[in-house]
Amino acid sequence: MIVCNRRGWFALLLGFLSLLLIGCTTAPQSEQPIELIFWHGVNPPPNRIVLQRLVDRFNARHPQIHVQALYVGQPDQQLPKILAAVVGNAAPDLLWYNPTITGQFVDLGALRPLDDWWQASPYRDQVSPALIPTMRYGNHYWSIPFATNNLGIFYRPSLFAAAGIKTLPSTWQELEQVSQTLKAQGITPLLLPLGQGEFAIFTWLPFFWSAGGSLGETPETAHIDTPAAIAALEFWQRLRQEGLAILSAPERGYELDQFIRGEVAMQITGPWT
């Protein structure tokens, strides 16, 4: 299950669960309901409360099915657990995961193609056309949209005001200038994610794209050793070298503790915040 447009995602989940069971013999009411284990990484905790309410609503409407939603960590933390569960033949029935790792699961034979479900789904018009390619790998559909995320540089207005900054930066040069102003006032300007995992790459890609980079349409045409990639990496490097950015703990770039405490003025994050 992909990490895509929230509009109608519960309906998609509900429909997926219902259609997943087509062809199964419905148990009489006197028998135990069909148990489905759903692993997810929804965060922060208040969002998990919302998800659990939706799961409870689904269970109440479908007494012959019982979904148990279990939080198993953020995407970078999930992967070892998921791979171990698949190898140990103890994988969950439903899985929230990032589509960038679909290929690993397909190679392990851990996913069931959803081509038949997708072709017959009444929820097709609720999925943004921009998200449909994320559902595919090779010649099959493997997942359905769950939520989508946009990134931005979030900032603390109080810290900007303390440094006398009245205009928000809109270019790399302006971001660097604002960071210099914050630093001159003894304020740590920016926190950048450190790591080789999905989140650090996810937050770096907008810089790569804004420098004119492209990953290509297929794995075969994807090239990262380009002037755009070098420019984006050198920009982050320069921010570090000039003392304008600090790094997160390894593979923990999504944690917002320092930003929330006002110890850093800016951080790259998204609407889940």
Image (cartoon, helix red, strand yellow):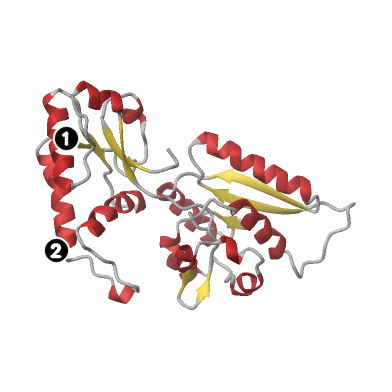
Crowding at mark 2 (Cα within 10 Å: few <14, some 14-19, many 20+): few
Q: Is residue 236 left or right of residue 125?
A: left
Instruction: For marks 2 and 1, give the CA distance.
Output: 25 Å
Image x and y of residue 191, in percent: 25, 37
Q: Is residue 26 above or below residue 71?
A: below
Q: Is residue 261 left or right of residue 124?
A: left
Q: Residue at x 68, y 59 (%)?
A: 15
Q: Amino acid at mark 1?
A: Val
Q: Is residue 121 left or right of residue 34?
A: left
| Foreground disc of the pair 2, 1 | 1
Secondary structure, mark 2, is helix
Q: Is residue 159 left or right of residue 238?
A: right
Q: Is residue 22 above or below residue 273?
A: below
Query: Would you name the residue on which mark 1 appears?
Result: 178
Q: Residue at x 26, y 30 (%)?
A: 265
Secondary structure, mark 1, is helix
Q: Nearer the viewer, residue 209 or 196?
A: 209
Image x and y of residue 126, in percent: 58, 60
Q: Residue at x 45, y 56 (%)?
A: 98
- Quarter of the image with the C terminus in it: top left
Q: Is residue 99 above or below residue 156?
A: below
Q: Residue furthest top?
A: 162
* Quarter-of-image position of residue 272: top left
Q: Residue at x 35, y 53 (%)?
A: 198
Q: Amino acid at mark 2?
A: Pro
Q: Nearer the viewer, residue 192 or 37?
A: 192
Query: Would you name the residue on which mark 2 appears?
Result: 227
The answer to which of marks 2 and 1 sits earlier in the sequence is 1
